[in-house]
Image (cartoon, rainbow, N blue to C red):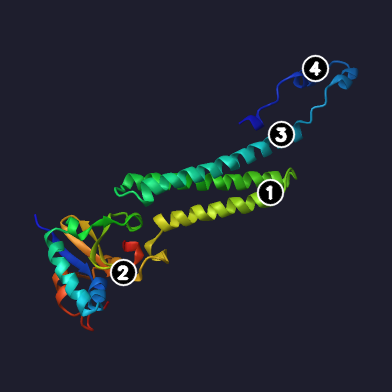
Amino acid sequence: MPATLPTPGPVRKASRSQTMGFGASSIHQVQFHNWVEEEEADELTKAKSDFSLWLSAIAKNEVLFERHVYKNPNLSDLDLHQHRSLLFGLLSFGERLIVAFHKLGAAKTIDPSNYFKLIQQNLDSLLESFNAWHGPLEAQEDIPEEFVEGIRDIAEGKIVDLDKALNEKPDDAVQV
Amino acid sequence: MPFKFEASKAFWKHFDKLNPQQQAAARDKFQTFKKDPFSPSLRPHKINRLTALLSRTVYAVDIEGDLRVTFYQDGQTIMSVSIGTHDIYK
């Protein structure tokens, strides 16, 4: 991670000379190196770059999700595992970006409010996709109630022979 | 080995609520369904989102107009889950 690497060059040498007992006059020869601000600036550059990469990854993955999950006529378990894996990765990266921008905000390097808003919007959208495809059935507001009811019935053993369902009337005694 | 055909009680209840014309059309289609639930004439198709949510492959077949039946296969059992006209069944 370049932003956290120690800065090489003459400054380190000068600083080292100082600690090795060279005369006080040499202090005036030390080139000023504000590494604190430089470090923060590097973190900002990295956070901004990571943010752009993350947005690109979301867009790129959406195309993959369309092809391999949402509209895949041969959807398999492996496709769903990969879908979850990528969503988890994008969510995790987004949360780390929030932390990174919080740190930069605390150091007064940047006002991160707009980044927070954009990151949160994307996180919400990713989480929505995750829940819509991998969340609990009962929590889905747009799935027809009759389907949810059918699955619940099956889980509870409320099952009938198909012929009976097609040819007989459910009487009041049937708890449906 | 032939399939065993079962249905949820919710399917039973909702089938009973269809109008007589829809019920007749459904019974007719179910003749084909019981011979081969994956017969191309029924246009069987996977419903990806329901498949993902249930972690099992959920299919729908066309009955009449927008009316569709959802089902899944569990070994030798074909389980009809629901019958309806919702867009997600398309």
State whether discs 1 and 2 lie on one chain.
Answer: no
Q: Quadrant of the N terminus of chain A?
A: top right
Q: Residue lying farthest bottom? A: A172
Q: Is A166 left, or right, of B57 in this rendering?
A: left
Q: Chain of mark 3?
A: A
Residue at which label 4 appears: A17
Residue B60 lies left or right of residue A134; in this view the side is: left
Q: Secondary structure at mark 4?
A: helix
Q: Position of residue B9 (x, y in %)?
A: 24, 72
Instruction: Decide which of tag 4 and tag 3 comes sooner along the chain.
Output: 4
Q: CA distance from mark 3 to mark 1?
A: 17 Å
* Percent coordinates x, y for residue B55 in the rendering: 32, 54
**Is residue B87 visible from the viewing direction of this image?**
yes
Residue at 48 percent of width and 43 percent of height: A60
Q: Quadrant of the C terminus of chain A?
A: bottom left
Mark 3 surroundings within 10 Å by alpha-carbon count, few (fewer than 14), some (14 through 19), many (20 or more): some
Q: What residue does disc 1 label?
A: A112
* Inter-mark Cα distance, 1 to 4: 40 Å
Q: Which is nearer the N-term, disc 3 or disc 1?
A: 3
Q: Tell me, yes or no, whether dots 4 and 2 are on the same chain.
A: no
The chain ID associated with circle 4 is A
Residue at (15% x, 64% y) in the render: B5
Q: Are marks 3 and 2 on the same chain?
A: no
Q: Which mark is residue A39?
A: 3
